[in-house]
Amino acid sequence: MTPYINADLHCHSIVSDGTLTPEVLAQRAKANGVELWALTDHDEIGGQDRAIEAARLAGLRYLTGAEISVTFAGTTVHIVGLGMDHTHPALVNGLRATRGGREMRARAMSDDLARVGIPGVYDGALKYVDNPELISRTHFARYLVEAGVCKETNEVFRKYITEGKPGFVPHRWASLRDAVGWITESGGVAIIAHPGRYKLTANEEYALFTEFKTLGGQGVEVMTGAHGQADYVKYADYCQEFDLAASRGSDFHSPEESHTDLGKLPFLPGSVTPVWELLESRIH
Ligand code: AMP
Ligand code: MN
Ligand code: MN
Ligand code: MN
């Protein structure tokens, strides 16, 4: 299959930290010219049946998806899975277990923020949460904007809830081995999400790609909302170096917050194998 199709294989709905429903996302993707779509909520496949049906109604080809939070070399790395059987017990149980830590982390974040003079953040954030199993830092950020603590969600991350800031609570997510295992056991393809975003040294990044390959990972996001021109070139080169397929996804969360809308990315370069070539039999 050609790399030159408008595939958007990374976005979020209200089932995790997006603000739109799977149905509205499907319509928006269609309106923006997307031809192949995947909904990839954080650590959650609860929106997949709705997305499959909405894609069918909109006349969109669809791949199942999820974005799994992983702890690697002391930082958080995201692994996107595409084309899984989203009812497979290995995936369902693994994701349920990894979601389990979010509630405690959220309460600890709220306690820490109360200590620096910002009370009631847990209850405030909950107003933005649709899925009680998936309270995210994004929900905290939305509440702190509402409360007038910051002007926009980016500023909340920068000042309060990233590493070293008063509301940041370190968290142990899934291992790289588990995340890749859940995806491949359930028939999907594992992909390193937005590699240009991580604060890894060159050695750590090399270790990530090498270990990922050894564990059965098959793809890397080349075109994503978080990448610039230099990242496009760098990670297209990594596709050759590590023999990985390339993916394309906006990481769209919300019309108000996201810079890159569904389907609004450059095409993949002609030099790479697109991940959809590995996933033809998994397309709905
Ligand atoms: P969590 O999984 O709860 O730790 O939240 C991670 C989510 O926060 C990511 O998926 C992004 O949607 C969002 N996020 C992370 N960093 C930033 C940032 N600097 N600005 C805005 N959103 C961010
Ligand atoms: Mn997110
Ligand atoms: Mn991510
Ligand atoms: Mn994402």
Image: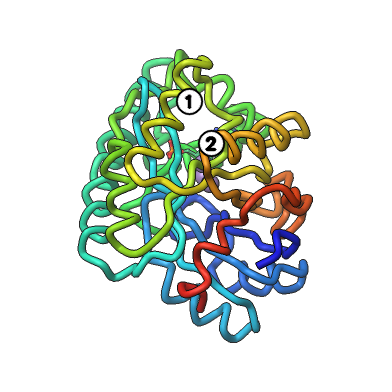
Task: Locate residue 164: give its quadrant.
Answer: top left
Which mark, residue 141? 2
**Does any portion of residue 257 appear in the rendered image?**
no
The reply to whether the residue tagged 2 has its Cβ within 8 angstroms of ligand 1 is yes
Report crowding for label 1: few under 14, some 14 to 19, many 20 or more residues within 10 A (C-alpha): many
Task: Give the secondary structure at mark 2.
Answer: helix
Q: In this view, does 109 lie to the left or right of 147?
A: left
Name which residue type carries label 2.
Answer: Ala
| In-front residue for pair 107/14 | 14
Q: Is residue 189 left or right of residue 236?
A: left
Instruction: Identify residue type, mark 1.
Output: Ile
At mark 1, the secondary structure is: helix
Q: Where is residue 23 in the image (x, y as percent from the top left)?
A: 57, 74
The structure residue drawn at horizontal position 64% and vertical position 43%, both measured from the top left corner, is: 222
Disc 2 + disc 1, Cβ < 8 Å? yes
Residue sitting at 61 percent across and 32 percent down?
Answer: 148
User: As displayed, is residue 148 above or below residue 255?
Assistant: above
Task: Tell me the residue at 48%/47% (across/down).
Answer: 191
